[in-house]
Image (tube, rainbow, N blue to C red):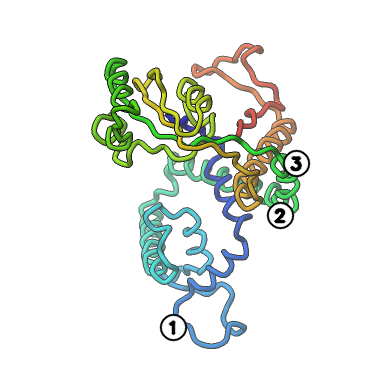
Amino acid sequence: MRRSCLSLTFLASTALALSLTVQGASAQSAASGSAQPAAAAGSADAAPKNPVIATVSGQDIHLSDLQEMSRNLPQQLQGMSPQQLYPILLDQMVDQKAMAIQAKKDGLMNDPAVQQQIEVGTEQVLQGALIRKIIGPQITPDAIKAVYDKDYANTPGVEEVHARHILVKTQKEAQDIIKQLDKDKGANFADLAKQDSTDPGSSNGGDLGWFKKTDMVPEFADAAFAMKDGQITQTPVHTQFGWHVIQVLGHRTDPAPTLADVQDKIRNQLIQQGIHNLLQQVRSQVTIKEFAPDGSPLPAADTAPSGAAPAAPASK
């Protein structure tokens, strides 16, 4: 019954990298230090800031190259320690350098398709660099706190309900369960949920935990929030999922979130708004002509204004 949130994909990889950068610059610095070989000798002051960590046919690989690769680790590697990651990433860097050397020997740098891909890659790198340069300094603790004070602090709490349910396919099945739950018959709600409910999560007795009204589909939410503590629906509730028998276990008012609760969300909002503003700025400074897939000019009505940019996403 819970609604899924729409996620913004616009410039997502660059925005995520920026979010991680502004979120933990100091932590990243510490991690960078810990990624150096354990065998390195001498004091920290004497150690080179960007040492060579491998050479491939005389071409150097620096620690900064490895750190750059570590920015976009696959999910299965993100939980590994620097000591575990270092040899894995180093091997990848060596493999990459060896492949690039061979590709150049084979003359692939002169391949038009390769040149086009290099140009695209260069533009993507420049785009990311511009975003980090312009937007990064804007994402400060003070900026995050200002949004929190405006949009979250001292806001009224949101009502929540704790409920459990039994989901079945037909109205008759639901009515039969309600009869079994009648006080005179004394059936146990949790036992019936485990026995009869088609909800995959019914093994916990149909317990849905605490939820806000907007977390559930309207029919279910309207019924649950209108009930009193301990009450069981006397009429089955119909939704797109089937027929529900609901028992409300409690009501509470969720307190306003703390800054720690929402600072990551606010940071991402500021990044996305910054990207939106930056796009408006750079598009207004260039001449744009757009064409149909066959190369013919688009009608004026179909061409976006120079200053136009994707609408800022609605946040949940």
Residue 57 in which image quadrant:
bottom left
Identify the residue at horizontal 39%, vertical 58% (top origin). Answer: 77
In the rendered image, residue 113, in percent from the top left (x then y), is placed at 43, 39
The amino acid sitting under disc 1 is Ala
Question: Which numbered marker is on residue 150?
Answer: 3
Disc 3 or 1, which lies upstream in sequence?
Answer: 1
Residue at the extreme front: 184
Q: What residue is shown at x 47% (from left), y 69% (from top)?
A: 60
Q: Which residue is mark 1?
A: 39
Q: CA distance from mark 3 to mark 1?
A: 50 Å
Element type where label 3 sits in the image: helix
Q: Secondary structure at mark 1?
A: loop
> Label 2, label 1: how many angstroms apart (C-alpha)?
37 Å
Number of marks: 3
The residue identified by callout 2 is: 141
Q: What residue is drawn where x is 66% and y is 51%?
A: 259
Q: Is residue 174 above or below residue 163?
A: above
Q: Give whichever of discs 2 and 1 has the lower sequence position.
A: 1
- Give the crowd class for mark 3: few <14, some 14-19, many >=20 residues within 10 Å: few
Question: Is 221 or 17 nearer to us in this picture?
Answer: 221
Q: Nearer the viewer, residue 287 or 270?
A: 270
The type of residue carrying mark 2 is Pro
Figure check: 169 above or below 126: above
Looking at the figure, which quarter contains the C terminus? Answer: top right
Left or right position of 113 against 49: left
Residue 129 % position (x, y): 63, 50
Q: Secondary structure at mark 2?
A: helix
Q: Up-down: is 290 above or below 26?
A: above
Q: Within 10 angstroms of label 2, few (less than 14), some, or many (20 or more) residues?
A: few
The image quadrant of residue 46 is: bottom right
Q: Is residue 201 visible?
A: no
